[in-house]
């Protein structure tokens, strides 16, 4: 079965390189799922569905081909004496859970207190987008975003809050449509200083 190697940073849990099926193999898999669901993939309305699904997956899971460190590597030291926290509110989160591959949609709130340099604010939003466009849990994504900022910028502290609605809970299973999941991760001064942490949480809840 012909396959192309995925980028080296994508490895199995045993450290082996992952392989990516061909587009044709992916489209065939979609046809199999359509038939398993009980419909005919040869039906006119479904003929182009496999191609559309594969193209959608390229967009939904584009984060596997992106490196967040690349976006956090360019920093600026001239901040004219600014010594307070930087907060981004209402960053869109569109992700898919690794358990059911169902979407979870919400907002992210990210803050850090610079130690020496700052990064462009759009780069922080980009980091959220990169990790959200992968299969994972909300808890894992929250920690990944926090770790990436902490490791790359070495700030005095980092704070991340994500609030999202999970369709694996709202459209199946228990069918609770109005439940939101909130996850947080704090490092440095946000973990040790309750006043600073609460200040971040108040801004996030405005």
Image (spheres, rainbow, N blue to C red):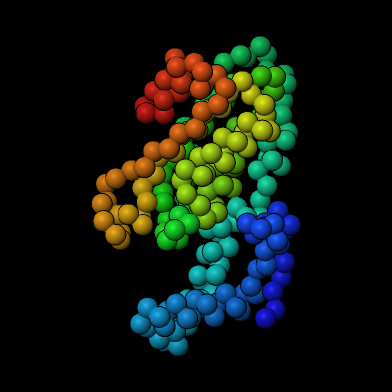
Residue furthest front as drawn: 14
Q: x, y (%) of residue 151?
A: 66, 33
Give the percent coordinates (x, y) of residue 198.
42, 20
Quadrant location of residue 99?
Answer: bottom left
Q: Is residue 92 visible?
A: no
Q: Vertically, is 188 above or below 109?
A: above
Q: Which residue lies furthest to the top in this view?
A: 81
* Residue displayed at 41% across by 29% down: 204
Quadrant placement of the N terminus: bottom right
Left or right side of 13 for 50: left
| Quarter containing the C terminus | top left
**Horizontal arrangement in the rendering, residue 92 relative to residue 17 (left or right):** left
Most foreground residue, 52 or 165: 165
Nearer to me, 125 or 14? 14
Question: Height in image: 93 above or below 134?
Answer: above
Residue shown at 46%/21% (left/top)?
Answer: 197
Q: Which residue is drawn at 41% across and 49% down?
A: 105
Q: Is 32 left, or right, of 182 in this rendering? A: right
Residue at x-position 37% and y-position 51%: 166
Q: Where is residue 30 in the image (x, y as percent from the top left)?
A: 49, 76
Asked if one can make out residue 59 in the rendered structure from this viewpoint, the answer is yes
Quarter of the figure with residue 16: bottom right
State the residue in front, 13 or 60: 13
Q: Is residue 12 above or below residue 31?
A: above
């Amino acid at each position: 079965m012909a396959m192309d190697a995925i980028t080296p940073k994508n490895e199995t849990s045993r450290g082996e390189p992952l392989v990516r099926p061909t587009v044709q193999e992916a489209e065939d898999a979609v046809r199999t799922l359509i038939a398993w669901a009980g419909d005919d993939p040869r039906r006119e309305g479904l003929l182009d569905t496999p191609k559309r699904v594969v193209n959608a997956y390229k967009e939904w899971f584009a984060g596997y081909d992106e490196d967040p460190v690349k976006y956090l590597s360019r920093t600026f030291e001239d901040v004219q004496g600014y010594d307070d926290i930087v907060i981004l509110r209402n960053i869109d989160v569109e992700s898919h859970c690794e358990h059911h591959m169902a979407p979870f949609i919400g907002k992210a709130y990210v803050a850090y207190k610079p130690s020496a340099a700052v990064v462009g604010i759009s780069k922080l939003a980009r980091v959220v987008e990169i990790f959200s466009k992968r299969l994972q849990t909300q808890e894992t994504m929250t920690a990944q975003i926090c770790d990436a900022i902490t490791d790359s910028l070495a700030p005095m502290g980092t704070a991340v809050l994500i609030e999202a609605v999970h369709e694996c809970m709202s459209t199946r299973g228990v069918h609770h449509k109005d439940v939101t999941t909130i996850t947080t991760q704090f490092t440095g001064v946000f973990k040790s200083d309750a006043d600073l942490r609460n200040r971040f949480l108040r801004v996030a809840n405005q």
